[in-house]
Amino acid sequence: MKAQMEIMGLAVIVVLIALGIFIFIGLSARFGEVNQIVKPEAYNDERLATTYVDALLRTSVPSCHALHVDELLRDCALNNRTCGALGSCELVQLVIENVTNATLDVWGKNYSLNVTYPLGTKGISFSKGPPCVRRYGVEPYTVRLHPFPGDVLVELSLCKK
Amino acid sequence: MPTHLLKKGQLQMLESIGVIIIITFLIFFSFSIYQRFHASEIARKNQQQNQLSAIDVANRIGELPELQCSHVDVVTVGCFDLVKVQTFAAFATSPAFRLMYYPLLRESSITVYETYPSPHNFTIYEQNATNTSIPFFMPITIYHPQERTYGFGYIEVLKE
């Protein structure tokens, strides 16, 4: 009788351990599944980085014959002609600063926006927050200066949270 | 009755009761932990669902010919025509208008902002959306047909 009771106790313990293992495996499988799915916030920021630069470069600057930002970047790299009271380099920097202040800063994003010119023209760089540890990888947008001296690269990186 | 006088059967009974109490406690404890985990999981899923719906609404609104920039039937992606936006916004408060767009936009609040060169905004659709939801932003250019220029702006979508 005593031996039977002990076997019953052992069986209960085995059942409990098996149940625990099943629950553990079930939960870890579920977590793995969740981590593999692209999260909406990741999709948002990745898409935002692309559409933002696209819209920015197409924006017209009324104080400079309604030239688009990409045209001003091109002019800055090649000629830096005067437009109103400012040169195209200063003007395009001012426009980008205005736009980022009214959007990315207001949305509370940590970002870095860099414009790199060829031939040693001083680039533009705006950022908010500490340097990104992990960022959404977006290819730099290229403004062609065909056939010479190269390309202007516009890159917006949004930090992953 | 003094403890040393307890019979063997009574001691075993006490042991069993102790084991049952401990097992019951463990079951309740695990259940409460699971409940807590499950509640936060549901809240997180709900938030993700809202964000996905906001993305869906932003995509739909971006594809509306009523708002898109077009020139000789050629559509510019990621661009809204200012005159079309103003006209759309003028009808936004009309119940018939909201009823017409409800199957497409559901419970949401959609505002078009222009930030450069002249900051202003237009609420183009509003139907029972809460301000507590996480907004979805989609940068766009806003075409000014009279001046033939483009401003920088964005769409903000809030979902219930």
Image (cartoon, coloured by chain):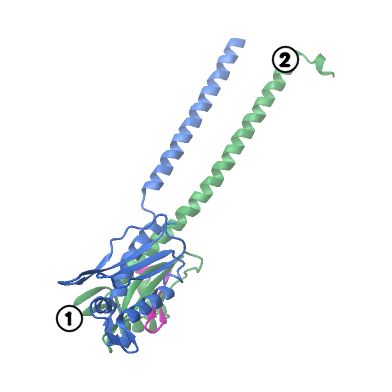
Magenta span: helix, strand or loop, mainly? strand
**Could you tell whether B96 is left or right of B150 in the image?**
right
Q: Disc 1 is attached to a residue of which chain?
A: B
* The N terminus of chain A - image quarter: top right
Q: How far apart are marks 2 and 1 (CA)?
A: 97 Å
**Would residue B124 be visible to someone looking at this image?**
no
From the viewer's side, name the closer residue of A41 and B64: A41
* The C terminus of chain A - image quarter: bottom left
Mark 2 vs 1: CB contact within 8 A: no
Tell whether position B126 is magenta: no
Tell me the magenta residue range. Answer: B103-122
| Residue named by callout 2 | B9
In this structure image, what is the colour of chain B? green
Residue drawn at the location 50% of the way across and 69% of the way down: B131
Identify the element where label 2 is drawn.
helix
Q: Which mark is residue B72?
A: 1
Q: How many labels does the image show?
A: 2
Residue A17, percent across and down? 51, 27
Residue B4, percent across and down? 81, 15
Q: Disc 2 is attached to a residue of which chain?
A: B
For residue A129, above or below residue A95: above
Question: Which is more foreground, mark 2 or mark 1?
Answer: 1
Mark 2 or mark 1, earlier in chain? 2
Residue A144, percent across and down? 20, 71
Tell whether position B113 is magenta: yes
**Could you tell whether B135 is left or right of A52 in the image?**
right
**Would residue B138 be visible to someone looking at this image?**
yes
Identify the element where label 1 is drawn.
loop
In this structure image, what is the colour of chain A? blue
